[in-house]
Amino acid sequence: MKHLTCDVAVIGAGTAGLAAQSVARKAGAQVLLIDPAYSGTTCATVGCMPSKLLIAAADAAHGVRTAETFGIRATAEVDGPAVMARVRKLRDHFVAGVTRAIDRLPEEVRITARASFSGPGTLDLDDGRSVAARAVVIATGARPAIPGPFKAVSEHILTNESLFEMTDLPRSVAVIGAGALGLEMAQALHRLGVRVEVFDMGETVAGLRDAAVSEVLRDLLKAEMPLHLGVKPEVSPEPEGVTISWEGRSRDFQHLLVAAGRPANLDGLHLERAGIDLGEDGMPGIDPETLRCGETSVFIAGDANGHMPLLHEASHEGCIAGRNAAAFPEITRFARHVPFVLTFTRPEAAQIGTIPDEDGSEIVTASASYEDQGRARVEARLGGLCRIHARRSDGRLTGASLCAPDAGHLGHLFALAIDAGLSAGDLLAMPFYHPTLEEGLKPALRALCEQVDQPHDASRQDDAPCA
């Protein structure tokens, strides 16, 4: 048995793990990166990139079908095998970029094995070796959750890890889960000609905390495809797929796409041997500003900690964990990014900053509708609602919930403004080009300015009406 030693052991070579090892090595630490497969990041292989490739194909098909709105007659014929071939080809291109970066790592850094704790600061590898490390970063990612009742039809289940391996589009799919992933894939498949229905026991969509914005997105999606909320679907096998039953109704589908969450991939690590206390949910307590587990020398970054399972957060957390692991026992607290979550439905939905449970004495809220916004009408993309929150005392922006065309771009505007400590008046004083979707936010910004206690410089604000 060979015993390895290092300053920092990083378990998992995804986005967070790669960032952690890079930062720790730049800090002068001796690092071992441990992964059983080095197959690429979740984003490139089964997440961000292949899902957006499928959405891009759906956008193209939808654009052709709705072209007559602009006086253009066209017919969309979806070639399922060609659609999926492009998804896999470009997915593999993105994965290759990640694997090339991994291949450039020094051989002495990369350890191909599966690790588990044997004690505080010590790891057992499944190839018979062991590792002693001053600090450990866990970046093992997450995996799709398959609720127990659905396992009876496991041969017909799709997840984000199997959907993109299909060589043709399915005929019909029941989507379980109205979160970001479920809605994105449901709408994309629907626009590509697949019969799709969505089921969720909850009443909100896309994880939106603002009930008004969630309701608008729900209604826009319901106008396009069946969306069953507040129901508990039951599944049973049928000769060519599955039967979904709910509230006295039933329908047959070829496949079940389960998008019911992605729990942290911590099984088999034996965290208790590292002196880590686990909560009732099986998760350790993690300081979000240091990513340290309690008083141990273990740090958990990326999807594995369940805080914000998003690529930009995984990268940021990998940097935080890598810096603190390299400097351990010295610990630095890091400011976190402004929370920013985006769902790539059509229209897009975004949630930025802090969303209050309800308007109170300290927070004021104003809305902007995209039901009749000028640029959205020009592009035949009407529909949506933006709700913006600010402090009553000085008008500084604190959060926003958006359901609107290109909400991702609008969301970046708010993330930057909140991070910079800008007020509604500061933002309104900036130029808004005409005609753009951004100027549709001006009515809400004006309304916020009228509600705050601190006077603002109205002379700097553009009061010209926007279409």
Image (cartoon, rainbow, N blue to C red):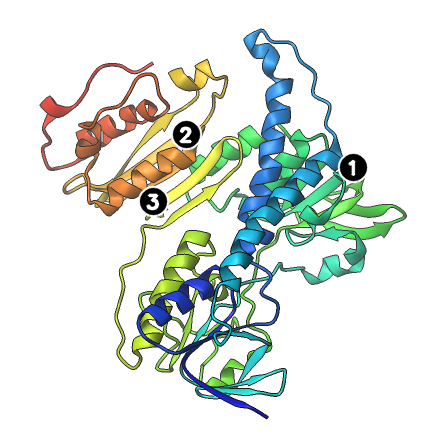
- Label 3 is placed on what type of residue? Glu
Foreground: disc 2 or disc 3: 2
Please tell me which of labels 2 and 3 falls first in the chain.
3
* Mark 2 lies on residue: 385
65 displayed left or right of 219: right
* Mark 1 lies on residue: 171
Separation of marks 2 and 3 at Cα, in angstroms: 17 Å
Within 10 Å of the Cα at label 2, are there few (<14), some (14-19), or many (20+) other Cα atoms? Answer: many
As displayed, is residue 211 above or below residue 62?
Answer: below
Residue nearest the observer in this picture, 19 or 450: 19
Q: Secondary structure at mark 3?
A: loop
- Label 1 is placed on what type of residue? Arg
Q: At x 67% / y 36%, what residue is drawn?
A: 189
Residue 445, percent from left and from top = 25, 29
Foreground: disc 2 or disc 1: 1
Q: Which residue occupies the extreme right position in the image?
A: 239
Residue 16, percent from left and from top = 45, 62
As displayed, is residue 393 above or below residue 45?
Answer: above
Q: Secondary structure at mark 1?
A: loop
Please tell me which of labels 3 and 1 falls first in the chain.
1
* Mark 3 lies on residue: 358
